[in-house]
Structure formats: C-alpha cells, structure tokens
Amino acid sequence: MNNSIEEHASKPFIKRLLGHRLTFPLVVLLVVVIQNIITTPNFFDISIRNGFLSGYIPNILDEASELVIVTLGMTLVIAVSGGVDLSVGAVMAIAASFCGLMLNGAEYRTDVFHNPYGLALLVGLLGGGLCGAFNGFLVSRLKIQPMIATLILYTAGRSIAKQITHGQTIYIMNPVYKYLGVQIPGVPIRTTIIISVSIVILVVLLVRLTSLGLYVQSVGINNSASRLVGLNSRRVTFMAFVLCGVLAGAAGLVGSSSVGSVNSGELGLTIEMDAILAVALGGNNLFGGKFSIAGSVIGAYTIQAITTTLYAMNVRADQLNVFKAIIIIVIIVASSPVFKEKITRMTRTVFSRKVSLGGLSDERQ
Amino acid sequence: MKDNRKTATAPNQIIKRKGMSNAGALLLITISLFVLLYVISAILFADSNFAKYSVFFNLINNKAYLLMLALGVTVVLITGSIDISVGGVTGLVSMVIATMLAGSGISALWVIPVSLGIGIAFGIVQGFLVAYMEIQPFIVTLSGMFFARGMISVINPESVPITDQLFTSWSNAKMYIPFLYNVRGNGTLDVAYLTPAAIVAILILIALIIALKKTKFGRSLYAVGGNPQSALLMGVNVKRTKFMAHVLCGLLAGIGGLLFTLFAPSGNPGNGYGYEIDAISSSVIGGVMLNGGVGLPIGTFFGVLINSLIERVVPRLGIVDASWPRIITSAFLFVFIVLQSVFASAGKGGVKLRLPAWLRFSRRKDGHTQIESEQADRRSA
C-alpha cells in the first residue's frame, strides 16, 4: 500500500498525464482539429456574416448544441444506472411536438402564437420530464434494465409525437420562434451556443453545489451499499432519468426552433448513438459510477467535429453510422477491463525480460 | 420461482414442483391473450373473415421473417443477453440480395449462403465482443444495428426491385393445405396455404423447440441465463454458450432477412427499420424473461402471432396511420414487462402470485397432501 503511494507520487508527469481522464477525449479532438487544419486552411477564420459570427468553429459549436444538452442527461443516466437512455431522440420529438401544438393550435402552418411562447416552452420541457419520469419509474420502481425500459419510448416515442401533431409536420412561421434556435436580433452569437453553454454551467452547478453528483456516483458504483448507507437510491435514479428527459426536451425545443418546424420523424434522429459515443469518448465508465461532465462535453464537441469533417469529405449522413459504430466499438473495447488486463499481461511478459536483464547489469556494477 | 429451484435442487427430495412454473404461467397468459384477441376481432369484424382458415394461416405467412428474428432474440434473451441488431441485419441482407440479383447473372441459389453468411458474421463478431470481451450486449448490438443500417446505404442508397425469375418463383409459391378451406360467396374455394418462407420458419421453430428442450446446448442456455455462477460451477462453458447463442441469433437473423426478402421482394434502405423492437416484444409477450433463464420458443411463436394480429386488426379500427400498430405493440411490451417484474418479485416474498389450488396443473405422485408438502418445503427452507 505504502509502496503504491510512493509509486504514484514518483510517477513521471507523462504517465500521470496519460492516466488522466480528460486526456483521451482531448487528444481525439486535437487529431480532428489538426486534420481539419490540413484540409481546410480557413478553419480558424471567424467572420461576421448576416449579423452573427460564422466560420467553422462557430458552426461546430452551433451544430453540437443539441448533442451537448442531450449528452449531459445521458451522462447522469449512465452514471447512476450503468445503462443507457435510448429514448432521448424520441423524447426530443415529443417535447417539440407538445411545444408546437401549444403554439400552432390545430393549424399546420401559421405565424400567430395561440398561446404565450414561454408557456409553450414550459409545456415542452414538462413533456420531456414526463417521458423521463416514465423511464425512471420503470427503472427505479420496477427494476427493469434501463435499456429495455427506454426501448419502449425509443420505438413508440416518434409515433406518439406524430399523433400529437396530428400526423403532420407543423411549421411555426412566427420569427420569435427562431430566437431559441437561431439568433436573437442584435446578439452576434447564435442563441444555441449561449443556451448550451448556460445549460452546461447549470448542470455543473447542480452536480457540484448540491449532493446530487455524489449521490449519483455512489448509487452507480454500488446501488445496495448506498441504500444501506441511507441514500434513497430509487429516488436518485428516478431524478436522474427525469433530468435526462427534461434535458432531452430542451434539446428538442432548440432543435425544432433552429429549423422553424416540428418534424417528428427527423428531429434528433440517431442522436442517442452520438450521445452514448460522446459519453464513452469523454472517458466515462459505461458500467456506471464515476462521471465527468467536462469529459462528456468535450466528447460531444469532438463527435460534432468528426461529423462535420466527414460531411466535408462528402460522406452521406446515413453512411456516417458505419464510422460511428466502428469508433464506439474500438473505444469500448479499448476501455473494457478484460482488454486492459490482457494488454497488461502481454506487456508484463514483454517487460519482465527487460527487467531481468536490467537486474543482471545492476549486479555487474 | 426461487422456491421451485430450491426444492428441485435439494438432495433426497421427491416433492414435485408445485403449481406452474413461471414459464408455464407466462405461456398460458400469452396463448389465452392470443385466443381472446382473435375471438374478439372475429366477433367485432365479422366482415373481415377472421373465422376463415386462410386468414389464420396468413398471420403466419406475413410474419415468417419476424418469427426467425424473434426466435434469435429469444435464444440470446434466455442466456441473459440481448440483440438489437436483428432489424439492421434484415435490412442489410435484403439490400445485398437485391443488389446481387440486379447486378449480374448470379444464380438466385447463391443468395442463400450469402444471407446466412452475413448473419453468422454479425453473430460471431457480436458474440465475441459480448462473451469474451465482456462488453454490455446492448452497446455492442446497438453499434451492430447502426453499422448494418449504415452499410445498407453504403451498398446502395436507392431502392432496388428484384426481378430474378427463380427468386420471384420462390416468393410466389404457395403450398395449399388440403381440407382447410372455406367457400367464398361466389362459390369458389378459399383454400388456406403456406408460403415456402412460412414452412422454413415452422421447421426451424420445431427444430429449436427440440434443441432447447433436449440437447446439451439448449439446456446450458437456460443454465447460463438462470445463474451464470452456478452454471460455471456445474461445468458449463459460460462464455462459449453465450458466444454460440449470439452466433445462432445472427444465423437466424440472416435467415430472417432472406425470408423477409421473399415476403417483400425488393431492396429498400428503409427495410427492417424497427424490426428489433417487434422481435423483442414478440419474445417478451411470448413469456421470455428479460433477466434470462426463462422462455420457450413456442411462446415466442404466439408472441409473433399476436404481433401479426395487431397489425391486421388495427387498420380495421379505422386508424389508417401506420404508426399506431407500433404504439400498440409497445404498449403490450410495457404491460408484459410490468407483468414480468411482478412475477420476478413474487418469488422474493413480494407480491404473491399463485393460481388457486384447483387451477394448478400439479400432479402429485408422492402421495403427500398439499399442506404436508408445503410444510416440508418450509422445513427445508
């Protein structure tokens, strides 16, 4: 024990850096950025066009905003349950449908708000929270594996959203609706960037200032032990799922606002894959327990950077999934305990010869 | 369930299990649900011929591919794993077949080894990652699903019709069943028939029922799903069993893709979308426990029939929108998951779920009365 502490203290800086949780996502991000710099020389150019900042980097920040918001919720769910919330994309569609229904009434295409804008947003978030509560109830009360519990909404959610909007894509033509997803007049930064950054700060504060983060970690590491300590592990799990639903709802509102319509078949399609990928890339343990919001956020921006880069290389949207599937499998295999053990065993057999040689040379001296 | 196991494994005990097993009870619920739904829809929609033999057999014909996918999912669910790539594999296989037959003069016979090969390849890779690398099956097969879906559009982003003569002759073939016919209004006979796809599916169903019941492999699947640790202590190769279960599921998904292409002969990028949920819900409705260790292929068969029935009945209710069958199937899945959760907690002293004594199927050969054997249970526990 003593020995290991000394070892840790005497670990060279490089090793400590390599062992740090944020190193891996940052390195991947760096690789993507370097690749972009080589292919597109004007990568860092930022100009003001049409009254707001534009360029590669603001674009990536803007396009990543939905993913960042969803990833925050996914991080909490993975940490608390060791399972994944598959329904986030469908929940986005449901929340946006609620909001669109409130604003448009029964009309498919109108520029008059039928209800106050703020109220509609609130109803949208509430819809997301309701979906989260449904998932949370199944997981925390009925003890169903999270992935199967959320599979129900994953498949039914889009159909439900379609029924909410009377089976049609609805268009919200009022320019105020685009404030959330595009730009508030006079502000040079896209609103999506402001919203995603402020939500990240909010969640970080929630996790750091309250004991929620600690509770989530302890329930994720050992559910029954934390119950014995006196934590209401059911409630913590439930809360994490509700929060995930609300955040997915927020992402849905932002997403539908940026296109000015609610299309339940398209909104947030396959975002669950990206969110899982972002959480894995951020160095979080997919089996639950410790989590890092910063890692997940960096992971989300990295995924968006990869996506944008692949689009620039003329890869079709549906072909992207092949790359993402391979990347996620590689990351997870590399971080799996079995693989690590095999690697250490292999390196040990290689290094043990060197060590014995070193010992011999020591004796000679 | 727990009680039953204890008494069954305790030494020198001759007391037979009392009442029904969970698998039996869930199967009974499924079958009665199917019969109930069928009878109700036959009464409600008297004009839509639910009383005809051909309508019943069409339920099987239309969902032969789903039976394959659901049986594959059943096998992996029994080992406590899961596979959600089956829908993607179905779509991929159908697209590969369509592209193969459209491009060059390859004989249609080649599609059989190719589709089985694709399925087995998915099964081997996913099985290796799940069993030997110990990665969560959900993540592995989710990636498999996205990989398959992506590969579909890499191979061909457009839809391709199949015009190959041999292949279309397979998909149009009908095997009429003697004696099962109704007379139509105009005097012609409406004879029930099975498609080649349905026959293949039924043969595989029978083979699986026998394999899971009688063979060493089949029994080790249940052992691994019920309790991996004790299976290991019993000498079952847990990792290999899980691996083989995934390979089998991949193979069945490949066959499912082939049967699907026979049912709908074209390659379309949207093919197989969402079929994983149909397969999982059919298995779960058919009484396969999500925690592993419990489930019967025959239950899955009835689950598939219920799914097929829902798809046929829902448009009759005046709901034209295609999204409703899926909502209803998901609702059924939800109900059955809750039911399973109740069943699972029933053994742990939670909810007592037991049929009244006169309804149980138990046959006591040891001569003990009910009360005596229950007392013996209590003493041994």
Image (cartoon, rainbow, N blue to C red):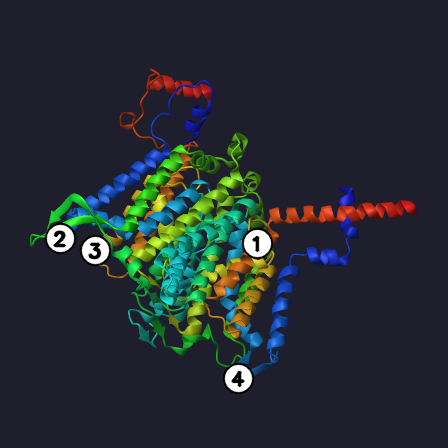
Q: Earlier in the sequence, mark 2 or mark 3?
A: 2
Three-letter amino acid code at the position of disc 1: Ile
Residue at 45% of width from left, 59% of height from top?
A: B148
Residue annotated with mark 3: B317
- Residue A312 position, x and y percent, is 53, 74
- Secondary-structure class at tag 1: helix
Q: Earlier in the sequence, mark 1 or mark 4?
A: 4
In space, the residues marked 2 and 3 are separated at their CA atoms by 13 Å
User: Which-is-in-front pick, marks 1 and 4?
Assistant: 1
User: Which-is-in-front pick, marks 2 and 4?
Assistant: 2
Q: Which mark is residue B47?
A: 2
> Pointer 3: residues within 10 angstroms few (<14), some, or many (20+)?
few
- Secondary-structure class at tag 2: helix
- Residue A186 position, x and y percent, is 51, 81
Residue annotated with mark 4: A49
Q: Judge by depth and name the residue closer to the eye, A235 or A336.
A: A336
Q: Residue furthest top?
A: B367
Q: Are marks 2 and 4 on the same chain?
A: no
Residue at 41% of width from left, 59% of height from top?
A: B92
Residue annotated with mark 1: A332
Q: Judge by depth and name the residue closer to the eye, B3 or B219.
A: B219
- Secondary-structure class at tag 3: helix
- Residue A16 position, x and y percent, is 73, 56
In space, the residues marked 1 and 3 are separated at their CA atoms by 46 Å
In space, the residues marked 2 and 4 are separated at their CA atoms by 65 Å
Q: Chain of mark 1?
A: A
| Res B303 → quadrant | top left
> Pointer 1: residues within 10 angstroms few (<14), some, or many (20+)?
many
Three-letter amino acid code at the position of disc 3: Leu
Q: Judge by depth and name the residue closer to the eye, B240 or B358.
A: B240
**Do tag 1 and tag 4 residues touch (Cβ < 8 Å)?**
no
Q: Chain of mark 2?
A: B
